[in-house]
Amino acid sequence: MVVSASKADAEDSKQRSEGKQPKVEILEFQEGVGGYQGTVDTELWALAPTTILDTNPNASSDANNDGGESQVLLRFDSIIGAKANQIPRNSRIRSARLLVSAFDQGSTVNLHRMLVPFSKTATWNSVVDGVSADDVEASRHKDSFTFGKIAANTSTVVFDVTDTVQWWVNGHANHGWVFLNTGGNGWDFYTSEFDDFKQRPKLIVELDRPQVTPEKKTP
């Protein structure tokens, strides 16, 4: 079963006609908050091609970081399933937002859905010269983007990732995202290793759980 917007909208209309409001559930995933421990994030840097950077408290997406490109990989594991505080398969995703705390203004950054897995120990070399948005390693289509400007020392930047989370919930593998900078001015944000929990990456999902059809009793 694949969730379709038209079917979900029809169900909404039916519930409203019966005087019922569709129940929207909100789930949040942020490292160290509410027992969640599934964030995987790391930076890949061409000038340190074999260095593992997953324990850094901040990461930079930069097309020219001191002469070599930097990319950032981010994934939220164990967010889909039948357990408490997970998104059930075949839910309808009304909204999914990825929030990161940026602290350095930079060039426009595009967020692309990853199509291949990566580990927390990934390096520039281990993924073979970084990640390419070529519809093989990552989707050519960008989920969202930012101009990189921040309003103060730290600003919460929101990426709309609704389509990708729905794609995962419909049965495709969750390989997270890659942040790719379009210029040579680095754009930096805090990772899941940062001391202040509130400034770690957060995924907020608004959803409708799949409808459960009662079993018919056999006479």
Image: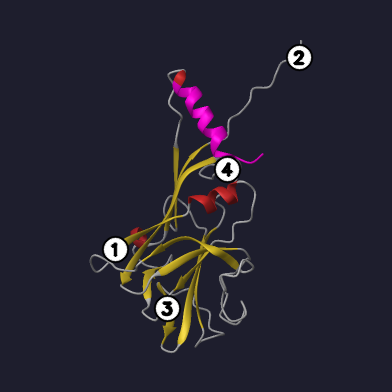
C-alpha gap between disc 3 and disc 4 = 38 Å
Q: Position of residue 117 (x, y in %)?
A: 62, 66
User: Which residue lies under the disc numbered 4?
Assistant: 83
Please tell me which of labels 2 and 3 falls first in the chain.
3
User: Which residue lies under the disc numbered 2?
Assistant: 218
Residue range of the region highlighted in magenta in the rendering: 1-16
Tell me which residue sits at (76%, 14%) in the image.
218
Please tell me which of labels 1 and 3 falls first in the chain.
3
C-alpha gap between disc 2 and disc 3 = 63 Å
Name the outermost residue toward the left: 152
Above or below, 35 against 90 in this view is below
Tell me which residue sits at (57%, 33%) in the image.
7
Quarter containing the N terminus? top right
* Amino acid at the residue labelled 3: Asp
Quarter containing the C terminus? top right
- Between disc 1 and disc 2, the foreground one is 1
- Near mark 4 (Cα within 10 A), the count class, few <14, some 14-19 or many ≥20, is few
**Viewer-proximal residue among 206 and 112:** 112
Q: Position of residue 100 (x, y in %)?
A: 38, 62
Left or right side of 218 for 158:
left
C-alpha gap between disc 1 and disc 2 = 59 Å
User: Which residue lies under the disc numbered 1?
Assistant: 155
Please tell me which of labels 1 and 4 falls first in the chain.
4
Please tell me which of labels 4 and 2 falls first in the chain.
4
